[in-house]
Image (tube, grey):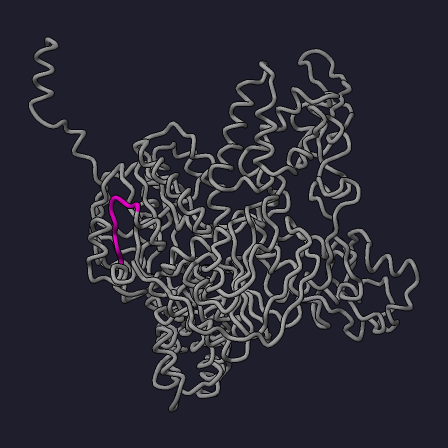
Amino acid sequence: MSMTTRTEQQSAGPHAADSHDLIRVHGARENNLKDVSIEIPKRRLTVFTGVSGSGKSSLVFDTIAAESQRLINETYSAFLQGFMPNLARPEVDVLDGLTTAITVDQQRMGSDPRSTVGTATDANAMLRILFSRLGTPHIGPPAAYSFNVASVSASGGFTVDRGSEKTRTEKVSFSRTGGMCTHCEGRGTVSDIDLAQLFDDSKSLSEDPFTIPTYTGDGWVVRVIAESGFFDKDKPIREYTKKERHDLLYREPTKVKVNGVNLTYEGLIPKLQKSFLSKDRESMQPHVRAFVDRAVTFAECPACDGTRLSELARSSRIGGLNIADACAMEIRDLAEWVRGLREPSVTPLLAKLQHTLDSFVEIGLGYLSLDRASGTLSGGEAQRTKMIRHLGSSLTDVTYVFDEPSIGLHPHDIQRMNNLLLRLRDKGNTVLVVEHKPETIAIADHVVDLGPGAGTAGGAVCFEGTVDGLRASDTVTGRHLDDRAGLKETVREATGVLEIRGANANNLRDVDVDIPLGVLCVVTGVAGSGKSSLVHGCLPAEDVVSVDQTPIRGSRRSNPATYTGLLDPIRKAFAKANGVKPALFSANSEGACATCNGAGVIYTDLAIMQSVATTCEDCGGRRFDASVLEYRFGGRDISEVLAMSVTEAEEFFREGASRVPAAHRIVARMADVGLGYLTLGQPLTTLSGGERQRLKLAVHMADKGGVYVLDEPTTGLHLADVEQLLGLLDRLVDSGKSVIVIEHHQAVMAHADWIVDLGPGAGHDGGRVVFEGTPADLVAARSTLTGEHLAQYVGG
């Protein structure tokens, strides 16, 4: 075929490949989606919006991104798929035109004590290679600079069989140089246990002296101690000999016989370190976490000064700087230091490290340091840290999926984030963003608005089109897109002050500030300016109820009723009305369906294929044994009560034969925070990030405390829901509480009685109070970045 003929054929019509420029979704039914069918343009920026709980994450993450990941996993061999998570196919009829999806979500990074910003982004790995090549004196390979690698050495003999020759023993020795501090084992902190919080030493073992969770008088743990034979059960602990005290606290694991059963006895301290201190604090049950906070104090390791590294690792330097110094620097300063290095032998390494560090600065995280523990990052910081590895990627035609990338960003920083999203799109990628902020919605090429309500009232597409089309539409988002909260004409007067003097936590610089009481006080400033350090790190703990951004954890068996404690009064009410035990009305206890063990579904493991979940035939998915469902309260069985929405439950428990004041108080608080659409038995795993934080707020509203501290409560809130949140904050203040809010949302700032603005920048450029006063004064002065943006917002 000649070149001319081929060209004529190509120009005769559009190429077949050009017809695949849409992602087509037909009949999506995941979670609350109601047969959603949409077409999303590729290589464009599409924003998905709608009220919280309307189905945005179900469509974008649980349908489009999940199916893309599942299809990619299927391209690997069956052997490799056996090591991968089994992903179920989403509930959808047709998904066409998918490309490789890279998900950048809000999930907080793991809080393992050995995980840092540097290890999470590979910046540490590159620094270790750099020091192993250029550091003087040379101390070894990259592992010699790692706080996760311990130095070990061993020697011995092994037998070599030479076949027909005689076997002989050969000596071998092995050594590895690591950079771990041996005193703190690479954690940077050492723990000290307050013995007074473990037991009452005036009591004997027979008098139940322990104050440790699960160490009860009739439990096996205490029985092993008491029956071990090492102690006199009737002798007060304070009268123990030196050996007895050592055995109680530090004895190595020893086999003992208790009532004819062989068991292992171990001292309290090593046992607690294994059972409690080795776990992530946030994964602990509340009562265990309270015990650890009370009994354990963490101090900087005296051997390594908190650097986690051995003295040998800290002795090797490049231009007077060791690796611990480099990791402690703010990343923007470290980037300048790396830029100044000139060594041809490591040029590719320097270029890659330079790009990674510059990406931190570009994304607004230049104020972090590489030795910052990853568990201390906020949701927004964690999400932007995950973006780092994608910024310089040469891949195109990839689908990037973001979950509210503006979280934790000051209005000043949102424009920078918008530019990054546009850059990813302009490289030929499809960018899908779940977002509520009008500043990010405004840059969209295509908008999909879901709703019209939340939960069962949502799950439908209300609008598809341009931003101007959304603004003109009659959807909830369209009506509220241009909402602007005005400044209050009068502000409340403070009833007192909380004094903070000489605050030096993290980047704070001897901050002296008076936080007014009895009012709504908003603490604001650019990301990294020191807001959380001031509020969470310097406020007195007494009488303060803190609702931070740590995510609530729960399995598919956990639901709003179990998390809030609502199930307890419900079970007691059913038990009292029917004259039976409360445990019957728990699907995780005696009342569970025997076939599915109270799960409602039966999971069939198909090895490399995704597990299949089928509704339990015996209980019909209701989770309870048939005999339990015969018991009724207020005309309903327990499964029908758990299927109620919060709004229905509030009415059900308010009056009449089904009146339960304890249950009504809890569901009323859930309705107050805007969760009226949730069902009581809905698994926690199906809740969005914003829903989980508001559920946590509903629980803490019952705490007894005069001061409430809320960390970015607008996270995950739709524009229409912010007004309801402001009403809730007003009710808290009017009830006599003091409310302190760390917030970037201009509507909350405008509604405040008092503003404390930190800055002027982030990291070492922040840490100072740049404004204290009313929102009106801040707008009038326009002396800070916050003041300028708030003035633009209110039209001042």
Compared to 16, does 380 lie above or below?
Answer: below
Q: Nearer the viewer, residue 338 or 19?
A: 338
Q: Say whether residue 723 is left or right of residue 8.
A: right
Q: Say whether residue 474 is left or right of residue 685.
A: left
Residue 709, horizontal then vertical, whole percent: 56, 66
Q: Is residue 405 magenta?
A: no
Q: Does the magenta stretch include residue 446?
A: yes
Q: Residue furthest bottom?
A: 656
Compared to 486, does 58 lie above or below?
Answer: above
Q: Can residue 275 be seen in this view?
A: no
Q: Residue furthest front?
A: 781
Magenta segment, prevailing SS (helix, strand or loop): strand
Q: What stretch is highlighted in magenta?
A: 443-450
Q: In which quarter of the image is the C terminus?
A: bottom left
Compared to 413, does 396 lie above or below?
Answer: above
Residue 58, horizontal then vertical, whole percent: 33, 54
Residue 700, horizontal then vertical, whole percent: 53, 70
Q: Which residue is drawn at 43% across and 61% down?
A: 714
Compared to 269, does 682 lie above or below?
Answer: below
Query: For residue 120, which quarter of the picture?
Result: top right
Q: Which residue lies furthest to the top in this view?
A: 2
Residue 733, horizontal then vertical, whole percent: 51, 75
Q: Quadrant of the N terminus?
A: top left
Q: Residue at x 51, y 75 (%)?
A: 492
Q: Can residue 448 be seen in this view?
A: yes
Q: How many marks?
A: 0
Q: Nearer the viewer, residue 189 or 27?
A: 189
Q: Residue at x 46, y 64 (%)?
A: 776
